[in-house]
Image (tube, rainbow, N blue to C red):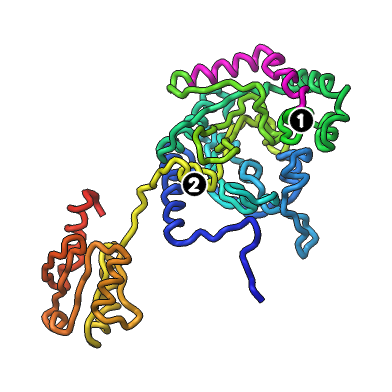
Amino acid sequence: MNITIPRGTQDILPGESAKWQYIEAKAHDLCRRYNYQEIRTPIFEQTELFSRSVGDTTDIVQKEMYTFEDRGGRNLTLRPEGTASTVRSFVDEKMHGWANQPVKLYYIGPMFRYERPQSGRMRQFVQFGVEAMGSADPAVDAEVIGLAMDFYKELGLKGLKLVINSLGDKESRTAHRNALVNHFKPRIGEFCSDCQERLEKNPLRILDCKQDAEHELMASAPSILDYLNAESRQYFEDVKTFLTAMDIPYEVDPGLVRGLDYYNNTAFEIMIDGEGFGAITTLMGGGRYNGLVEEIGGPETPGIGFALSIERLLMALDSQGVTLPVETGLDAYLVTMGDEAKKAGPRILHELRAAGLSVDGDYMGKKMKAQMKSASRQNAAYAVILGEEELAKGTAVVKKMADGTQEEWTLEELAANLKKHLEKEKGVSR
């Protein structure tokens, strides 16, 4: 029986995984600078969490969730996104009572959606997301957007475009909802079955339909911006003012509605221009979700956040030819000659690793020439050559692979000398 990888998943192999580690390290460092703390939530949750928070009219809940019943008869779902789990934890752990508000969290982890796999869209994918809960200050909206923009820019992406919209508060959304129903209802039979069902449950989601995107009623649909009350309008103006002050260009798109039910007020997406990235140009999205904490059983608490796919980020980097400065290669490779030198090898490797150096050696019984080839293939900066004669003297010959120069050092000074030479060459402290 030939067992293969499940459809819509991927193996991230050595070499490629170094890129993931670099990106994740960038996310950790950026969140540290913005004072966001990491949260790690379960891979699976009660199904009701997602049906209540994401929305039972969304494609995610209706078509894409991996849901199962466990042996205790509990209905569970592999998390399709990170916000609901983070908010659930916020409520469970009573973070609304923490002294420092807003509570600023971030996560990096796998999500699961059953959809047709395509480039940059997997059934198991990794999201990086942030959530800020406890403040209704529009400055927090600008901060969250700024963090997202900084993340992409610091990784070297060009041609970024920030698109924003306001979905208004509850009063504004109700007025807009009624206008949408009146607009689409006379001809709703011309739309797909999903849109027909959405008409009464959540007509805003009709605007997000891909199947009926070219229908003439889409272009003439009432704009949410025309139904914002004074408070919502001022909030949106404040967000734009802060973005301008932060020197973050943006475009307002009244058609931007996002695909999840919990959004209100600020909604945003970051897109990318350029050839080679495919038809789907959206890199990430987010928005404000005042009311979501209450929906999950917590006190009235405003919140805002975003999530982005690491897979789509890697696609964008590849499309622009961006090479991440990942560290590759070894500090040193130990070459041994003779039985006694080979027996001493594990101890020397252990000591060098304990000193913080990345080193490896031969475990295949290769001759010296083949060992040197291994050192070259693994991009070792130095080859540490140990034979019977060197072992008897307590020394090793150290060869710089770049130019072939050699020195003989005592085994006692080997680690310190290697670190000193590497620091000098790389210009960094190890």
Location of residue 122 in the rendering, given as x and y in whole percent from the top left corner: 62, 51
* Spatial separation of the CA atoms under disc 2 and disc 1: 31 Å
Q: Which residue is at 49% across, 20% downward? A: 242
Specify whether 422 is left or right of 116. left
Q: Which residue is at 21% across, 64% downward? A: 401
Residue with the mark numbered 2: 314
- Whether the magenta-drawn stretch holds residue 237 is answered as yes
Q: Which residue is at 54% across, 48% downward? A: 311
What is the number of callouts on the image?
A: 2
Whichever of callouts 2 and 1 sits on the residue coming sooner in the sequence is 1
Near mark 1 (Cα within 10 A), the count class, few <14, some 14-19 or many ≥20, is many
| Residue situated in front as seen by the camera: 385 or 394 | 385
* Image quarter of the C terminus: bottom left
| Residue situated in front as seen by the camera: 116 or 249 | 116
Specify whether 88 is left or right of 385. right
* Amino acid type, mark 2: Leu
Report which quarter residue 404 is drawn in.
bottom left
Residue with the mark numbered 1: 206
Near mark 2 (Cα within 10 A), the count class, few <14, some 14-19 or many ≥20, is some
Residue 67 in the image: above or below residue 193: below
Location of residue 420 in the rendering, given as x and y in whole percent from the top left corner: 17, 58
Report which quarter residue 348 is drawn in.
bottom left
Magenta-drawn segment: 215-243
* Amino acid type, mark 1: Ile
Q: Which residue lies most toward the top here?
A: 230
- Whether the magenta-drawn stretch holds residue 221 is answered as yes
